[in-house]
Image (cartoon, helix red, strand yellow):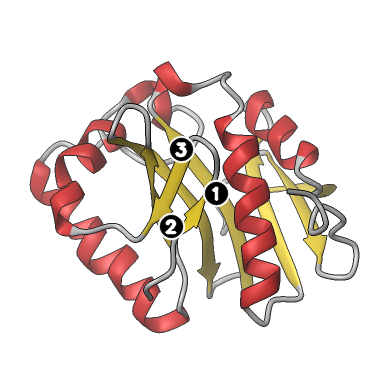
Amino acid sequence: MAYTIETDRILLRPFTEDDVAAVFAFGSNSEINRYTGDENLKKLDHALDIIRNTWFKDYETYGYGRLAVFHKAEKKVIGFAGIKYLPELEETDLGFRFLPQYWGMGIATEVSIAILKHSFVNFPLNQIIGIAMKENLASCKVLEKVGLKWFKNDEVLGDGGDHRWFKTIRTDYNILNKA
């Protein structure tokens, strides 16, 4: 996988092993993980393991995966965003996470529009979903704002949670014609 996606403020690019400290910074943040179901990372080695054995593997297997969100003005990785194939669900999921100081700035919306456009143009995907905990109102609003429609509340893989599920299909996705 060698693609990048660029917006006015952000460069989305594949992760590298050099991003390990940034991945640890957002992966060990309990405020970020509050709505993810993931445990906080405890060691730098765990961040490196995610890069190597999750993201690199997804790039190789599916041709896409979560991308590093590089803030151009600040010259640093502030989180991740992108699509990820979930084989257990046979679905491709749009997801994003950022350091809290970048919340509420429109970055999730900005990168999600670019990711959806790129994904429907460059990959043979007919549908993309987004899943957010019901309490995560900000993420739910972003998913709706970028064109995904709510279709059910359900748990994810038997986790017992109450998640809002959203989706868009290629033929209904109307942001493709926007910048």
Disc 2 marks which residue?
66
Q: Report the Cα–Cα distance between label 1 and label 2.
A: 8 Å
Asked whether the residues under the numbered discs 1 and 3 touch, taking CB atoms below 8 Å apart as contact, a structural biologist would say yes
**Is residue 160 toward the left or the right of residue 165 in the image?**
left
Residue 42 drawn above or below residue 102: below
Q: Is residue 156 at least partly visible in the picture? A: no
Point out the tag, 1 or 2, that comes first from the N-terminus: 2
Please tell me which residue lies in front, 99 or 12.
12
Label 1 secondary element: strand
Q: Amino acid at mark 3?
A: Arg
Please tell me which residue lies in front, 60 or 41.
60
Q: Amino acid at mark 1?
A: Gly
Residue 58 drawn above or below residue 164: below
Label 2 secondary element: strand
Quarter of the image where one finds residue 167: bottom right
Asked whether the residues under the numbered discs 1 and 2 touch, taking CB atoms below 8 Å apart as contact, a structural biologist would say yes
Label 3 secondary element: strand
Residue 13 drawn above or below residue 143: below
Q: Report the Cα–Cα distance between label 2 and label 3.
A: 10 Å
User: What residue is rendered at 37% in x and 28% in y?
Assistant: 73
Residue 9 tag number:
none
User: What residue is rendered at 51% in x and 31% in y?
Assistant: 35
Asked whether the residues under the numbered discs 2 and 3 touch, taking CB atoms below 8 Å apart as contact, a structural biologist would say no
Which quarter of the image is occupied by the N terminus?
bottom left
Residue 30 at what x, y percent from top left?
A: 34, 24
Q: Residues within 10 Å of mark 3 (few under 14, many from 20)?
A: many
Disc 3 marks which residue?
97
